Amino acid sequence: MSLTDEETLELHELLDGLVENNLSASKKAKLEQWIADSEEVRKTYVYFMDMSSSLVHYADERLSDEIIEVKENSSFDTIIKFIRPVLLIAALLVAGFYLPRVFVDKEEVLEMEVAEDSLSQNQPVNFIADTVAVLTKTVGVEWAEDSSIRPESGNTLEPCVLKLASGLAQVEFLQGSIVVLEGPVEFEIISPNGGALAIGKLRASVPEVASGFAIEVPKGKIIDLGTEFGLHVHEGGSTEVFVYKGKVLYEGKTEADEDIFREISGGESIFIDPYGHPRWVEMPTEPFMGKADLAYRSMEESQRRHAAWVDLSKEIAQDPKTRLYFSFDNHSPWSRLLRDESTAKNAPTNGAVIGCKWEEGRWAGKGALSFKRDNDLVRLNLPKHLKSATLAAWIKIDTLPSRVAPVICTEPNFPGAACWSINPMGQLALRVTSTKNVEIYESAVAFGKDRIGHWAHIATTYDSDTKMIVHYVDGRSFSKEKLEHMHPLNFEKSLLGHSGSSADPSSPLGVSLKGSIDEFVLFEVAYDESSIRRLYEIGRPFDPSDRLGAVLP
Amino acid sequence: MQEASLTICEKFKDFEIGTNFYSWACQIAYWKVRAARKKFATSKIVFNQEVLDVISETRGEMEEELDHRHGALSRCLQKLNDRDRRMVLTRYESGKNVTAAAQACGRTIQGAYKALTRIRKALFDCVSFEISAEQAR
């Protein structure tokens, strides 16, 4: 008998869960039984897993196309040709118990030994440490001194223990539950749908899709039945459970090994003493912070940071060393004029916006210019040449460029003409045309895939006194280099977000930025590292993801 | 899977020319998986041996069909829009996960999960349709 449409959908849901390692024990048991009972289900399972194997093959093939590395080894190739179908079988069988791990994340592997049998030689096999949650928000977090990890907002989390001395942290489990931890707290993330609270407070919000979310407490565990609840584990091991809506089940044991089950409904609260005995109580002793409270505090924090940036922005505008300053703020959505905010000089150097669209910048309500099409640009005219300079900008790039991602470039190529850009390797680069040739000063690789689509602060200082050029990303120095020849930098007739025109496809000219800019400043001095760091620290949006660690040189 | 292929390469010298290479290699893969299963019998997602046996048997009967499906999948991937294709191939790329796919395509993690479910179903249906169309010709 063939499967109904509903059954087919359910089967696909189970298979998806299997591949993504999100399958609860009961669903896994159902799938197993279904596979055993129905040939059609079995075949669908084989098709599905075979498709996953093929997708791995095609994904690797796509990678191989990008990184061409052909090794000629005819005998090995012959074996591989024979082995491919066998590998698919192995994948399929393996799928029955650890395929989800194989497909989840191959970045971090734990070596584990495989039991010996008549054929194996006890070789290590690679197993995968999974991402199970994401730290999505933090407010005033201080990590405990003995905390082994100190993730930042935006970091993915594998099974780990979070120890907060103070502050609030919001963790989103991959299965959909959201937990707000309130320091001091010690919370272990165990799986995509569960954890353990050793001490402290949390509030959990569990959507229907994550039903079954479980949190272990000292004398038992709380199993969610699709709801929102608060937990407080006190020193000494007593626990309070308060259910805001829906239902939870408490399963525990007393010291006398007596099984305890309590179903707790919305508005009800229980207190479990250190010996495991529960009793009904009226209200929790203290309120629990929820995600709405956290969002409110985040908003307050964001507003506070925005206010600090507004002050900094005024300071930059009034700095006598500011040659050009675009804050991109307070422009109407149809504005074709980009206002130079610097007030220290007589005539502002406003830019002419061509093609670009206005969009929201790194603060809610702040403007930014989006450069999407080939001829999106801002045309400028800066007559004064600069012996020393600091270029700084907040940018967001949509894709790593195939040629360059220009931030500001001077159109004509005469001595001192400069082009500040990010190259295809993800390096920040300043190209300067000298009388004899073109000099290119590049940073270490700063932009990887993890920075794509996120705001980043870039800066470059060009110092004629020390004859040094320094590149910075997010306030940190990424390279320091001696200048080969000194030329006053020339930004006359320059373009923001475009490298200028060229008919030669091999030339870096004729390329536009694919991304957004929401602040740009040009100082006529080379500021030091602490000043650049300050521009970043005050200017960074509230919730930056921690991408620096992985790409520091 | 990697270990199975390594063992097959190591033991290739023991393979008797004239016998069935495919059956020989399948035996190795099968026993490797059995061995690993013993170790991980307590892990979260484990199918019992009887189920693994029937899957193995069913899979063995579908070899030719699966080869066709592998080819059809390539065509179906080309039918996806760029964003969906990038999403699914990034997800299955070595060293990548749903988070990476979400980041590569500018989606939230939850959004990426939903999108991948939709894309896999679309690919599955497309491959089945391609195979039916092939058979009808």
Image (tube, coloured by chain):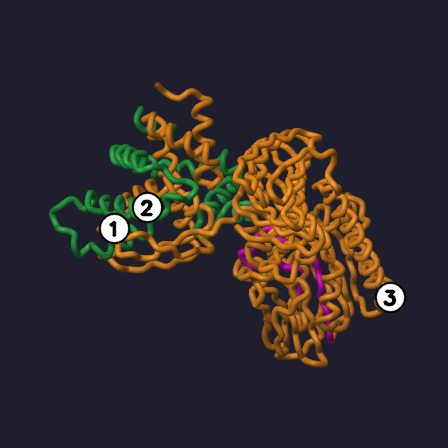
Chain colours: A orange, B green
Whether B45 is drawn above or below A336: the answer is above
Residue at figure coordinates x 40%, y 50% from the top left: A60
- Same chain for marks 2 and 3? no
Q: Amino acid at mark 2?
A: Lys
Instruction: Name which quarter of the figure residue A113 lies in.
Output: bottom left
Q: Amino acid at mark 1?
A: Asp
Query: Badge 2 is on which residue?
Result: B38
Does the magenta-highlighted stretch encompass residue A6? no
Residue at figure coordinates x 52%, y 49% from the top left: A131
Task: Quote the CA–CA distance across marks 2 and 1.
Answer: 10 Å
Q: Nearer the viewer, mark 2 or mark 3?
A: 2
Residue at figure coordinates x 38%, y 28% from the top left: B129
| Marked residue chain, label 1 | A
| Marked residue chain, label 2 | B
Q: Nearer the viewer, residue A44 or A524?
A: A44
x and y, in percent, of residue A549 in the image:
59, 62
Whether A26 is drawn above or below A309: the answer is above
Query: Badge 1 is on which residue?
Result: A117
